[in-house]
Image (tube, rainbow, N blue to C red):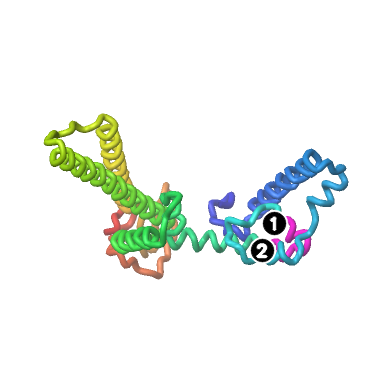
Amino acid sequence: MGEDGAIIPVEEDARGIRSLAREMADEYKGFVKVYRERMEMSAAEAHERAVEPADDFALEHAMTTTPDQVSWHAISAVGERDPALGEQVWWRLVQEARDDLASGNRAARAIEGYQHDPWDRARFLVLRESLAKEWRPANGIEWMLVDMLAQAFTLYEADMQHVMMYMTMEASLNDYQIEKNNKYETPRLTSAEALARVEQGMERYQRMILRVQRSLRDQRRYSLNVGNVGQLNIGGVQQNVVNSETSDQNARCVQGEVTERQ
């Protein structure tokens, strides 16, 4: 965001470029330290090795591998070979990040465990799609809240599955004990504690779902929609408002009034 409040795209934000340069400089210092301490190179040798341009293999890897496999050193090495190619590698990562966010895969990955499968990812994305159709998010904040709602409900369902697993396993074990020994085995304390923890987690995620829903509601209730009122008085200053597009969410456009999108 610029000093005047305007949103500056990543590609045009000079401050962001300077920050990237600092990251690559820090990685350069790390490589120099490793070369000198572990490989016992001289300062000049370590410097030459750290700034060595990318070869054909390293260039192809940086241009085609998955974004999470590209390091700061890789971008720097490609830049040493051709500054334009170094920038191209970085902008590819930026676009991949945009796609990752917009598609919902970033939100899905945040709640996936070590062993996840395509079916779990597809279920999350379909749930997110269903919520988006219902809430019709209009901006980045509302999309973030829809992602949080989908995450909370997914975790809620996972804990519900754990509750049912504990309950059915305990029931099956007791049926077996009764059939074999004609005796009912009282629940073990560890199992009861585990069940209680899972149930507490379900309640926590349920409260999270309700909080996110309230946030979405409030985000829309207290948003200012001035529509095409021509002129609006704010703080004693007259502002000319021109809006050529009409809202498709049945919002009431009343001069100076806070309206709620339904």
Q: Quadrant of the C terminus?
A: bottom left
Q: Amino acid at mark 1?
A: Ala
**N-terminal label among 2 and 1:** 2
Q: Report the residue at 47% width, 58% height from top.
A: 101
User: Residue 202 occupies which quadrant of the picture?
Assistant: top left
Instruction: Please provide percent x and percent y for residue 65.
Output: 61, 63
**Picture coordinates of residue 89, whole percent (x, y):** 65, 62
Q: Kindly indicate the quadrant of the structure image that contains residue 126.
A: bottom left
Local crowd size for mark 1, using a 10 Å CA cut-off: few (<14), some (14–19), many (≥20): many
Contact, CB < 8 Å: mark 2 with mark 1?
A: yes
Q: Which residue is mark 1?
A: 74
Question: Where 190 falls versus 108 (above or below)?
Answer: above
Q: Residue 258: in sight, yes or no?
A: no
- The residue lying toward the viewer, choosing from 135 and 196, is 196
Check disc 2 and report its element: helix, strand or loop: helix
Nearer to the camera, 218 or 142: 142
Determine crowd level at label 2: few under 14, some 14-19, many 20+ residues with C-alpha closer than 10 A.
some
Q: Is residue 3 left or right of residue 196?
A: right
Is 204 rendered above or below residue 101? above
Please tell me the numbered disc located at residue 231.
none
Instruction: Please tell me which residue lies in front, 39 or 28.
Output: 39
Amino acid carrying label 2: it is His
Q: Is residue 18 left or right of residue 254?
A: right
Looking at the rendered structure, the secondary structure element under dot 1 is helix
Task: Magenta stretch: give its range.
Answer: 74-88
Which residue is label 2 attached to? 61
Marks 2 and 1 sit apart, C-alpha to C-alpha, by 9 Å
Residue found at the very far left of the displayed protein? 182
